[in-house]
Image (cartoon, rainbow, N blue to C red):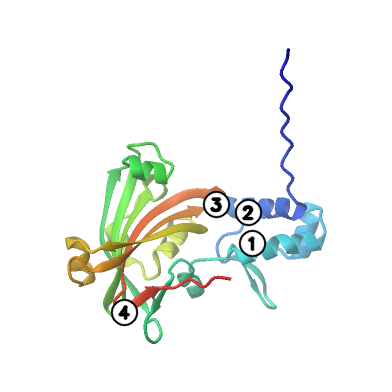
Amino acid sequence: MNKPSTFHSPTFSPLYRQIRALITRSLESGEWGPGDIIPSESELAIRFGVSQGTVRKAIDEMAAENLLVRRQGKGTFVATHNDPRSFFRFLRLAANEGELQPSKSVPLECWRAKAGPDVARTLALEPGAPIIIVRRLLCFANEPVVFDEIYLPGELFPDLTLDILKSGTSSLYSLFESRYGVRMIRADERLRAVSADRVSSELLQVAEGSPLLLVERVTFTYADKPVEWRRGYYSTQNFHYHNELG
């Protein structure tokens, strides 16, 4: 007796989601780069053969996810990490008292290695693939607050060195975007409490064994491709992790 066939219905995608995918494809290909203005809604409607309302709905969703930025009276632009407002999108840090002071990134080390099992799995690489490891401090008003250990796919950042990191005047993500064309789109984070070991205690200027917040982040670019694994050790003496929900 033959078993009945199993049929899988095709996944339905609303029209505006299809338009969103087409716009994203243009962003990914570099047709419109970070900071560029994109065509108007009416122009995109003609290009894709849909209504202006469908285009608007796609853009609204992309703007809500910080892929695009609407500017009143000017148009819609591709989001960029060079925009100072994007800094705290990926850094949920607040001072216990007063306003957060301007930050300073202090690169400490940058070297090349081969991906071990954990890094390979996290960054979707083959074991042994070339990677770059970066260590840096993030300071506020000269107080070291975050010690980051960052793992990057070597092929995406072919000439990254400590000198290049030290010469940068903007954020790491701005450097990755402008020099290497790698735009960080979204991130997944996990938080847990840890004790400061010898290295982190010296760098963060806290006693060994002091409580720290470990924030593990995997950052993705277009097409959900992982391009960074970051382990950040946060000193919470004068700062706290803040995330507004709702």
Whichever of labels 2 and 1 marks the residue nearer the N terminus, that label is: 2
The kind of secondary structure element at disc 2 is: helix
Disc 2 and disc 1 in contact, CB within 8 angstroms: yes
Q: Which residue is mark 4?
A: 238
The kind of secondary structure element at disc 3 is: helix
The x, y position of residue 128, in whole percent, is: 32, 37
Q: Nearer the viewer, mark 3 or mark 4?
A: 4
Residue at the spot 44% in from the left edge and 59% down from the top edge: 189
Q: Nearer the viewer, mark 2 or mark 4?
A: 4
Residue 126 drawn above or below residue 210: above
Disc 3 and disc 1 in contact, CB within 8 angstroms: no
Residue 179 drawn above or below residue 102: above
CA separation in Å, label 2 and label 4: 40 Å
Q: Amino acid at mark 4?
A: Asn
Q: Amino acid at mark 1?
A: Met
The kind of secondary structure element at disc 1 is: helix
Q: Which residue is mark 2?
A: 24
Residue at the spot 37% in from the left edge and 85% down from the top edge: 97
Residue 191 drawn above or below residue 14: below
Most foreground residue, 101 or 177: 101
Residue at the spot 71% in from the left edge and 53% down from the top edge: 17
Q: Nearer the viewer, mark 4 or mark 1?
A: 4
Instruction: Tell me the quarter of the image containing the N terminus.
Output: top right
Whichever of labels 4 and 1 marks the residue nearer the N terminus, that label is: 1
Q: Nearer the viewer, mark 2 or mark 1?
A: 1
Q: Which residue is mark 3?
A: 222
Q: Which residue is mark 1?
A: 62
CA separation in Å, label 3 and label 2: 8 Å
Whichever of labels 2 and 4 marks the residue nearer the N terminus, that label is: 2
For label 4, count other residues whose C-alpha is less than 10 Å away and answer few (under 14), some (14-19) or many (20+): few
Whichever of labels 3 and 4 marks the residue nearer the N terminus, that label is: 3
